[in-house]
């Protein structure tokens, strides 16, 4: 199955990643995907995610809580 991606979105506050997006199961968080999103304070990751890429949250200086 081809990869699907969500791009070009400004994120802030608490982010909830859905287990499915447009019919695709979210199974990974890509490398550098949240890089520099300094306004994110929390993130909820569904149990469908089995892989988190390198530096996925690099530069998220206000990220205080990650829930898996």
Image: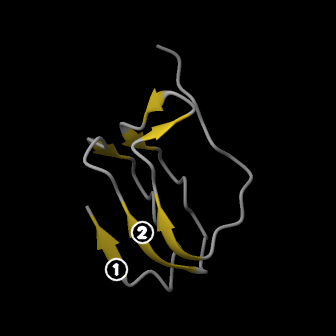
Residue at 48% across / 28% down in the picture?
24
Question: Residue 33: which numbered mark, if any?
Answer: none
Other-residue count near label 2 (Cα within 10 Å), few / some / many at <14 / 14–19 / ≥20 = some
- Does 48 sit above or below residue 11? above
Question: What x and y, as percent, mark residue 7?
Answer: 68, 46
Furthest residue toward top: 1
Q: Which residue in the protein does label 2 denote?
A: 43
Quadrant of the frame with the C terminus: bottom left
As drawn, 62 above or below 47: below
Question: Can residue 58 be seen in this snapshot?
Answer: no
Q: Is residue 36 left or right of residue 53?
A: right
Q: Is residue 42 left or right of residue 9?
A: left
Is the residue marked by circle 1 packed among few (<14), some (14-19), or many (20+) residues within 10 Å? few
- Regarding mark 2 in the picture, which secondary structure is present there? strand
Residue 39 x, y percent position in the rendering? 61, 80
Using the rendered view, name the quadrant where residue 63 is placed.
Answer: bottom left
Residue highlighted by disc 1: 65
Count of labels shown? 2
Q: Secondary structure at mark 1?
A: strand
Q: Is residue 62 left or right of residue 11?
A: left
Residue shown at 55%/61% (left/top)?
A: 34
Tag 1 near tag 2, CB within 8 Å: yes
Give how far apart the Cα atoms at labels 1 and 2 are.
6 Å
């Amino acid at each position: 199955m081809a990869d699907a991606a969500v791009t070009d979105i400004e994120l802030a506050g608490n982010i909830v990643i859905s287990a499915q997006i447009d019919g695709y199961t979210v199974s990974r968080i890509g490398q550098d995907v949240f890089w520099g999103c300094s306004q994110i304070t929390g993130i909820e990751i569904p149990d469908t995610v089995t892989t988190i890429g390198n530096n996925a949250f690099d530069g998220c200086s206000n990220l205080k809580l990650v829930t898996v």
